[in-house]
Amino acid sequence: MRNRLAALTAIAALSALAAGCGSEPSSDPGRSPSASSSLAPTTPAPPSTIPLDDESVPLAARITQAMATVASGPAGAEDVREAALFEQTAARDLARAPKAQSGDELGALGRADRTQLEADIAAARELMVMTDPQPKLPDWRIVTPPRPDELRRLYRKAQQKTGTPWEYLAAVHLVETRMGRIRGTSTAGAQGPMQFLPSTFAQYGAGGDINDPGDAIMAAGRMLANNGAPGDMSGALWSYNHSDRYVAAVSAYAEQMKRSPAAYDLYWHWQVLYRHQDGTMLLPEGYPDQKPVRID
């Protein structure tokens, strides 16, 4: 529910930010709460030689190239990671910009890329409201997540067993811990890759390990199914986190993964972006041994 992994704000991912973000707020399942636009025609992809950081090139052209790189490149490749981070931060930045500006950028994109970015901007706007910039960096470890094919197998297994659509499980996982990148306990005591309170996990975990990705994903599937999935996904998600904004953001990510396999590949590469009072910090794999990088 509204308790978050130490204010996981990943960006605005623009969530996650992230959450926004890059790293969005994470929830504590089972805890009481605290308090379509028309699409532009498809445009040709720009030359693959465009540097994504070349601000003399229109943002829409760079986003188009970034999305093509993610869709065609091998998981984990450096150029794919950089392209996914570019889209992630672009969505976050546009979520913070006046809507007229984001509308101009969306209008210059092709149909599929516009649909993706539009959803990510909308989710970022919802999640950024849920968290404030924090005065201290989090007491987390940032690790390499399970491979995308391994996670997809776990999501689909949970769907087969519980009926909860795998895309929604992946979207919850994305918002909660960036698909397993974040290792840490929330201020309310939520743990593991799906951020369960131990008492809630005892109810849905079937004797499994709260920190095991397969056990945690299966428990999330059971909990969501017990609260309305797949027929009432909004109600099911609200049981996970008593926030309409959380429901809207998770649903936006899930619907994109339903629409396109490339969306799942994109989200798997999203990084942990943390909203600090001094600016947005990228927490790299290996944090805290690896220093955070301020990106704005």
Image: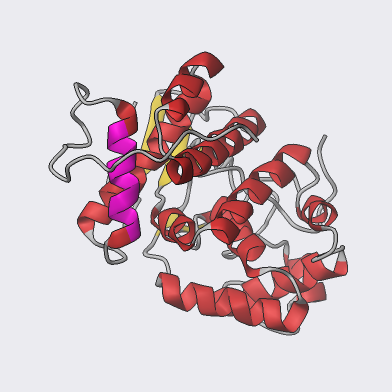
Q: Residue at x 42, y 60 (%)?
A: 265
Q: Quadrant of residue 74?
A: bottom left
As for residue 62 lying within the magenta part, the answer is yes
Residue 294 in view, yes or no? no
Residue 272 in view, yes or no? yes
Residue 226 screen position, x and y as percent: 86, 69
Residue sitting nearer the eye, 257 or 286: 257
Q: Residue at x 52, y 15 (%)?
A: 100
Residue 78 screen position, x and y as percent: 21, 56
On screen, residue 52 above or below 144: above
Residue sitting nearer the eye, 204 or 11: 11
Residue lying at the far front in this picture: please name it.
41
Residue 43 screen position, x and y as percent: 35, 38
Q: Residue at x 52, y 42 (%)?
A: 115
Q: Residue at x 17, y 46 (%)?
A: 48
* Left or right, 9 with reference to 85: right
Quadrant location, the C terminus: top left
Residue sitting nearer the eye, 153 or 146: 153
User: What range of the chain is rendered magenta?
Assistant: 61-71
Magenta residues: mostly which secondary structure? helix
On screen, residue 127 above or below 231: above
Q: Quadrant of residue 105?
A: top left
Residue 121 screen position, x and y as percent: 53, 34
